[in-house]
Amino acid sequence: MKLQSLTILGAGVIGLSVARQARLRGLPVRVLDSRSFGTSCSHAATGVLKAPEHRRSPYLDLRHQSWEEWPQLAEQLKDESGGVDCGFRICGGLDLRDRTVQDPHRALEKLHGSGGNVRVLDQQELQRLLPEMHREPQAGLYIEHQAVVDPDGLMEALRRSCLGMGVEITDDLGEISLGIEEGHRIVRSSLETPLPPIDEKNPLVLSAGWETSALINPALVKPLPLKPVRGEAIALDIPAPPHIVTFDAKLADVDDPSGNRSRFSWIPGPGGSSWFGNSVGDTGEGKETLPEPTATGRARLIEAAISFFGSGVESRIVRHWAGLRPKSLRHGGPLMGPIDIGRTLWIASGHYRTGLLIGPKTAEWLVDSLTGKNEIHENFSVPEEFRI
Ligand SMILES: Cc1cc2nc3c(=O)[nH]c(=O)nc-3n(C[C@H](O)[C@H](O)[C@H](O)COP(=O)(O)OP(=O)(O)OC[C@H]3O[C@@H](n4cnc5c(N)ncnc54)[C@H](O)[C@@H]3O)c2cc1C
């Protein structure tokens, strides 16, 4: 069926990427956001893009494909946005995680599928590369296929690209809620200017980050498997590392069987800045609107930073920020696709910690599916039990 228009709720990296893809295929597109541009989780990211270690699952394959397409995407966005540089740069990474330091050759073996150059570095090389480091790891790995992007630059490039192509973007609209009846028919929205008719030819995409569930849950028998997970980061006035540095720091008050909450990154941020974070914080209750950085988050980041840089690091914090990541609570990556039989309501959320990396690719897939070109891999589609 030929679409006539697309309406998107949410102007984060996902909503704008979907808008760009749909507009590239000639569809009239409007994007509506309840808050002002610049406040979304996408702006709070730390901008790390990594090729996965292998591609043995659909999600890892998606990350791999996304990684491969990023250099071209950065160029395209620059052209389309009238020259906005999203700061994409392949800078490589240093893996100093505990298990890597203990057995770097074993870790190297595991990375064969990631492509790019990977090699073991000895203690002297690490000290030369990281003179600010207080630790003395015996060894680590250099991994070529890691990059940074400037989250604000990316968002601005996407916004201007969309505007330049004629996408209508309206932000700061205040709380937007939908009234959904009879399965999928939208009978009202809280907007002063009513939504255009939503039907099979004019579908609605819900890409409101972690708040996507609030938009649609009232219409579902079972709530969508989506949760907000807080992330916090700090900027330091320590010279930026030449590569992204990943290491473990076991924190006193954090119970961490998965190891995710003990993993930290020191990142060459935009404009020579030095960022530190990517901590996985507590799961939110969904009550926060604009997440403020917390004292607990700061204390945890300081504890991890001290384990890496030594004491005195607290006085070198120049900024502290937070965001709420939309986490999909089932294995296998984000949730994408229609949620109703009539294919009028679509979801694109749950990108958790990799929204900047995979957002543009998932947008392409979503629009492929919307326009009938290709179906989304079943691993990402909305499971039957949540459909209406
Ligand atoms: C500290 C931190 C570090 C991170 N680092 C990285 C990283 O290094 N690499 C990476 O790839 N990812 C990273 N991420 C994850 C990444 O930021 C997210 O995956 C991504 O931003 C999610 O984008 P989104 O568009 O789904 O949501 P958002 O960016 O949150 O956008 C959702 C938008 O929807 C709007 N909205 C909400 N409710 C409504 C409504 N009812 N109607 C209309 N609009 C609504 C919001 O105002 C918002 O603008 C990080 C996140 C954090 C917090």
Image (cartoon, helix red, strand yellow):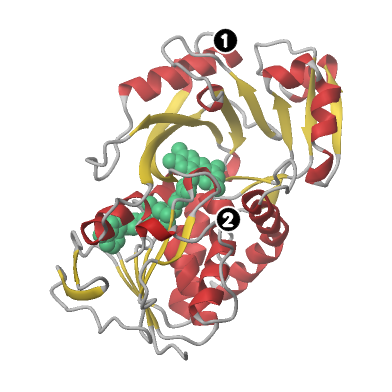
Query: Is any part of residue 46 visible from this angle?
Result: no
Identify which residue is drawn at 26% across, 56% down.
221
Say the numbered circle drawn on residue 358: 2
- Evaluate whether residue 230 shows in this view: yes
* Eye-nearest disc, 1 or 2: 2
Q: Tags 1 and 2 in contact by the CB under 8 Å rule?
A: no
User: Where's residue 192, x and y in %?
Assistant: 13, 74
Residue type, label 2 = Ile
User: Which labelled disc corresponds to residue 310?
Assistant: 1
Vertical comparison of 348 with 295: above or below: below
| Closer to us: 130 or 219 | 219
Q: Residues within 10 Å of mark 1 (few under 14, many from 20)?
A: some
Residue 204's quadrant in the figure?
bottom left
**Number of marks in picture:** 2
Question: Is disc 2 placed on a helix, strand or loop?
Answer: helix
Q: Identify whether 305 is placed above or below 201.
A: above
Given residues 226 and 11, the one toward you in this image is 226
Quick one: SS at disc 1? loop
Looking at the picture, how far across and down is residue 299, in whole percent?
39, 17
- Going 38% across and 66% down the picture, which residue do you hit? 339
- Real-space Cα distance between discs 1 and 2? 35 Å
Q: Identify the amino acid type marked 1.
A: Gly
Q: Residue at x 65, y 54 (%)?
A: 58
Residue at image coords 83%, 24%: 106
From the viewer's side, name the closer residue of 284 and 275.
Answer: 284
Q: Is residue 45 left or right of residue 203?
A: right
Q: Earlier in the sequence, mark 1 or mark 2?
A: 1
- Location of residue 176 with respect to 55 vertically, above or below: below
